[in-house]
Amino acid sequence: MKYLLPLVLILLTFSCQNTPPANVDWAWYLGGPDANHYSPLQQINKENVAQLQVAWTYQSGDKDDNNRSQIQCNPLVIDGILYGTSPKLKLFALDAATGEELWQFDPFDEAYQQFGMGVNRGLVYWNEAVESARIFFTAGTFLYAIDAATGQVIPTFGQQGKVDLHQGLGEAAQDYFIVSNTPGIVYKDLLILGMRVSEDIGAAPGYIRAFDVRTGEIRWIFHTIPQPGEMGYETWPPDAWKTSGGANAWSGLSLDEERGIVFIPTGSASYDFYGGDRIGQNLFANCVLALNAETGERIWHFQTVHHDLWDRDLPASPNLVQVKHEGKTIDAVAQITKSGHIFLLDRTTGEPLFPVEEIPVPESHLKGEQTWPTQPLPVKPPPFSRQEINKEDLTSRGLEAQAYAQALWEKSRKGSLFVPPGEDGSFIFPGLDGGGEWGGAAVDPEGILYINSSEIPWYVQMEKFTPADDNLLASRGERIYRTSCRACHGQDREGGDMFGSIPALTGLKDRLPEAEAINIIKNGKGVMPSFSLLKDEEIKSIIAFLYDSKEEIDANKPPTESTWPYPYVFGGYNRFYAPDGYPAIQPPWGQLTAVDLNEGTIKWQIPFGEYPELKAQGTPITGTESYGGPIVTESGLIFIAATLDEKIRAYDKENGALLWEATLPAAGYATPATYSVDGRQYVVIAAGGGKLNTPSGDAYVAFALPE
């Protein structure tokens, strides 16, 4: 009997450690304002994770197989209610314990739904005791405020519940393509929001705006392309702010609530691959920005690429971490990059904790272009992705694949991580989609960062621009196709793979009415932006080209002048895949890596993802490209889907050992969430597929331990 009481106490202690409180929320995009993808939940642990089973599945019923629809949403779970979005950007609320739908809000009328734009990666929740809680989300060109209890718009916000995202962007605003795929972040009564803009000519400037959460009014604007008298104006040509675009925050924000600082990663300036009209360092493109969240005033910035010519947008929310460095505990910012690097910066000053070297880079061979002479690279941590392609890295898989890889590699320009795009062609490795991407990194309280990476080279090439013969309407259309469409849809209209599945434009006359094609050009559809800057006559010309039709031109009307402003055009987005459909380099083609931010070292690294058909042939795990990120729990687990093999997996965070996997109804190109309701822990993932040539889906799948 003398041992009974201690034994009971031990059992009770163990039980309490593994039973979560009644409700533990996932109340912020990526888990918290720090964007660390972390949960304190421990009920699902290393010993029992293999017992996970499907608890519920919700299907929205609005996937679009013809256009490869997607779901990229990291849902919110608050007080037992899950909030998410569907492939067609319908907002919904579910009972988080059962998956039963509570309400649904459709932002689009029937006409617009056909041409709706983009994806949604998450939501923002705001609640004040004296007011009803509201959900903020974006769809098309609008920011909506929705009552969290009813799914109805809040009419006192903006114009009957919505705000046009063109506001505050200048006189030409209504001509700009603008969406906001990634949610903003709330500080007090402000919603701070970035946006996605075009990466072509005529792009909107990527200003950061703060909206009043009650009224929708703009409270402050930060000009990422500085105007006269503002810091950074001298890093652009005079008056570049009137014509330049981009430098936008499309990938997510993070917030230090105690200090009142919002951290913002920005992308490259437009045009992506030629910057002859933006000679200079180009602040505040490609920067980690620290702004006063109350006023929008700059506190510090750190630029990760000067005068970007490689589309090296900062691709994910900065992680706000605490690390042990040189005997001190330091609040820091960890920013992952597409190139596979991590910049670790002091949170209050922006100073790097590990040395950053400015390395010399080659000069551009293109007329009018001037590369910035150096580029910053951190000495530590080491890159989490491979950095160079050498001859021995080319595939040895079959004679045809070998010959293809060898031929393209031989003719490419080599010699630096920062070979500027040119007429001779070069590789960007890791590719234009990373390295790291919008799924971002998870970080635990010990300062270990977990990141999945894609490791596929992309081949880029610039070509001289020669206007086509203006005497034939179809020839003018071909010229416009070359400058506006070919980069994604391909040289011969055969389709492309920039976003996983760009449709071919051959044979349009047999499958798409001309009027519908005109609407798509003007309004956008799926992942395609609108090209509203094209004049009606230009759209008429490109339709004639795409539909192989001839049309007489008024002989009394002078031919249209070319509006393309550059001496070069971009040759297209081309992954380095061999004719057999697999990457033309040796594996791994995707990895999962643990990085010790305290020491600046790689803790472990494993191939991540597999091709089932190669696995069946006995090929070791190759890894695959991945979209979506990991989460990490207090119980020592990493949960992640993201790969094209349509699986979700759990890994041991200590060593990367695979502990559990399950097949999803479609690939889970999103970041999971974990939460508890009535003491039961769940892990949920959006299974929307649609990228990397995988089928589309419309499901959210929640897993839990058996009851």
Image (spheres, grey):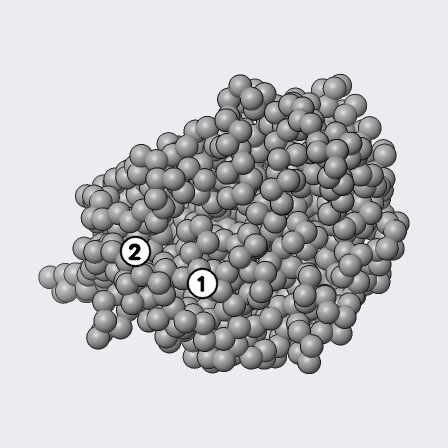
Q: Residue at x 65, y 54 (%)?
A: 202
**Element under disc 2:** strand
Q: Specify the farthest residue to the left.
A: 1
Q: Residue at x 49, y 53 (%)?
A: 179
Q: Is residue 55 left or right of residue 413?
A: left
Question: Residue 101: x percent and y percent?
Answer: 22, 45
Q: Residue at x 68, y 65 (%)?
A: 242
For the N terminus, give its image quadrant.
bottom left
Q: Earlier in the sequence, mark 1 or mark 2?
A: 2
Residue 81 shows up from this direction: yes
Asked whether 496 or 590 is in front, the reply is 496
For residue 318, which quarter of the picture? bottom right
Asked whether 9 or 685 is in front, the reply is 685
Question: Residue 513: x percent and y percent?
Answer: 50, 26
Q: Amino acid at mark 2?
A: Val
In the depicted structure, whether residue 696 falls above or below residue 321:
above
Residue with the mark numbered 2: 77
Q: Amino acid at mark 1?
A: Gly
Q: Residue at x 63, y 73 (%)?
A: 301
Asked whether 3 or 631 is in front, the reply is 631
Asked whether 539 or 100 is in front, the reply is 539
Residue 667 shows up from this direction: no
Alpha carbon distance from label 1 to label 2: 17 Å
Residue with the mark numbered 1: 184
**Element under disc 1:** loop
Q: Give the number of callouts.
A: 2
Badge 2 crowding class, 10 Å Cα cut-off, few under 14, some 14 to 19, many 20 or more, is many
Question: Residue 487: x percent and y percent?
Answer: 68, 38
Badge 1 crowding class, 10 Å Cα cut-off, few under 14, some 14 to 19, many 20 or more, is many
For the C terminus, give its image quadrant.
top left
